[in-house]
Amino acid sequence: MKKTNVVTLLLLMLVSVSAHSEVAQSADTLLINGKILTVDDDFSIVQSLAIRDGRIVAVGSNAETNALIGTQTKLIDLNGKTVIPGLIDNHLHFIRGVWNFQMEVRLDGIESRTEAMNKIRDKAKQLEPGKWITVMGGWSYNQFLDNSDRFSLQELDDIAPDNPLFLMIGYSEGFANSKALELANVESSGQARVQGRDNVGEFINLVSWRNKSSDESAIRTYMEELNRVGLTTVYDVGRPSEGELAPLEAFAKSGDMPLRVFHTLRYNARDAESTASALKMFESESTVPRSNDEQFGLLGLGEHIYSPVTDNPRNSSYWKEEVWAPFSQISFAAARNGWPVHEHVMSRVMAVQFLDLVEDISAEVPNVKDLRWTFAHANGMRDEDIKRAADLGIAFAIHNQARMSVFAVDAPRIGSIAKSGALWGLGSDGGIVAPYQPFITLEWVVAGTNVADKEGWSEDQRVSREQALIAHTRNNAELLFMEQHIGSLEVGKLADLVVLDKDYLTVEENKISELTPLLTMTGGNVVYTQGEMD
């Protein structure tokens, strides 16, 4: 080979190596000129963030990240916009939300009755005659500033003349038009209002349980909706079945899943026989707690680990031994086998009885604290109960209760929980009775307002904006054993983030619910964008 050819070849090799090195070291995506709330331990605020292979490789000033700009780097100029970590919902009934969303109208945060009625009317025009239209919680007629009267039958018949219409407020109250009342076979005495758990339950059965639709298209649509409101991770505590989870698992394997979805174990414990079967499942080598990966999978047990122990805010009596004993048996088995438990607690008697049980379990299984057992809702608990729970290592999952007065004596004492030192996070209980929009929840805990009450509650039970955002991001990641991967915008973590239209730290407290994501990113991939970020 001629000498000149050898030199040329060596030069080409050096250029090639240099080019490959640049590609390897440069960022795939670089966000610049922003106000990036990292939500790290110091709540640092930075200007720029670099992403490579789905993870964050640098945070800092524009000058500090400029060196990561390569020929293939995508630059996103934030123009001063605020960025927060992707929001995590620690208690969302994802699969049930999928069932409902195709026929649902959301009224969360709408303050005009006229606007609400127009949304329902528009939905009726889109659907074929005879198709159900639903509003599955997350609203109250008290939120309408122009007219907060209850709906009349004629009013609902007029806006959806060819479709059955059901507007659920809670498990004991809702509204329906004539076509819906006829299909549910519910007596109304000429009124739209539906009362009683049995009557409301019949509607839920009709529009949800008997009309399950969790195919790939329905799941994708719902995931995109959750991305739209700023969510990048959810925990489905509704015990979805394997069949319902199959499309999600396929999404996860394909790498084309814009939302991280974790779930609880599907089993049925309602009596001695089914409890025995459940106990075998907990101890089986084929059923492993926390067998999820970074995107999807089984995490723990909940929301009702024993079906007959189903708590509500009106509960004032301790569970009898014949009912409590199987609940206790399941709890002991869960602790022995390393299962995280996420249990529904909506009355003080349930909280106290469960705390007594956890004390007994701790004597036998000292490392139960490491399992991050969680009280969901935490209604009715007094400060002494909260301190006792914190001492036992119990965590709290607090959910926006849009249908309840913020002055209710049994509302969760969020300020006390935050001061207790316990791990606590924010969620929605969305999917059937509550608003899933996280900014409504953030306003609720910061300003003390909800969709039905804008005056606010006592300051000692509110928390700061920073505490609230930590609870909806970093703390929730810890609740889900995912703190090494998500929850804050730090080097090494997955690039889950949200760009906001206004600054979360300076917008008026009672306007936090109106914050709008302009861009949502999961694992470095843009999964939602609108407006100026398109």
Image (cartoon, rainbow, N blue to C red):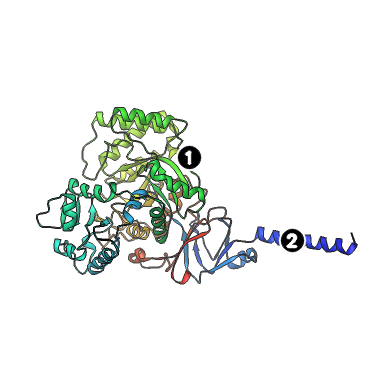
Query: Is residue 502 or residue 20 the one in the foreground?
Result: 20
Q: Residues within 10 Å of mark 1 (few under 14, many from 20)?
A: few
Direction from residue 472 to residue 115 in the image, left or right: left
What's the mark number on residue 40? none
Mark 1 and mark 2: span between their CA atoms?
42 Å
What kind of element bears circle 1?
Answer: loop
Q: How far across and how far down the image is residue 23, in percent?
A: 66, 60
Residue farthest to the right, as pictured: 2
Q: Quadrant of residue 24?
A: bottom right
Residue at mark 1 = 291
Direction from residue 397 to residue 176 in the image, left or right: left
Q: How far across and how far down the image is residue 315, in percent?
A: 22, 41
Question: Number of callouts in the render?
Answer: 2
Residue at mark 2 = 16
Query: Is residue 156 or residue 334 the one in the foreground?
Result: 156
Q: Quadrant of the N terminus?
A: bottom right
Q: Quadrant of residue 353?
A: top left
Is residue 511 positioned above or below 336 on the image?
below
Q: How far across and how far down the image is residue 225, in percent?
A: 39, 59
Residue farthest to the left, as pictured: 189
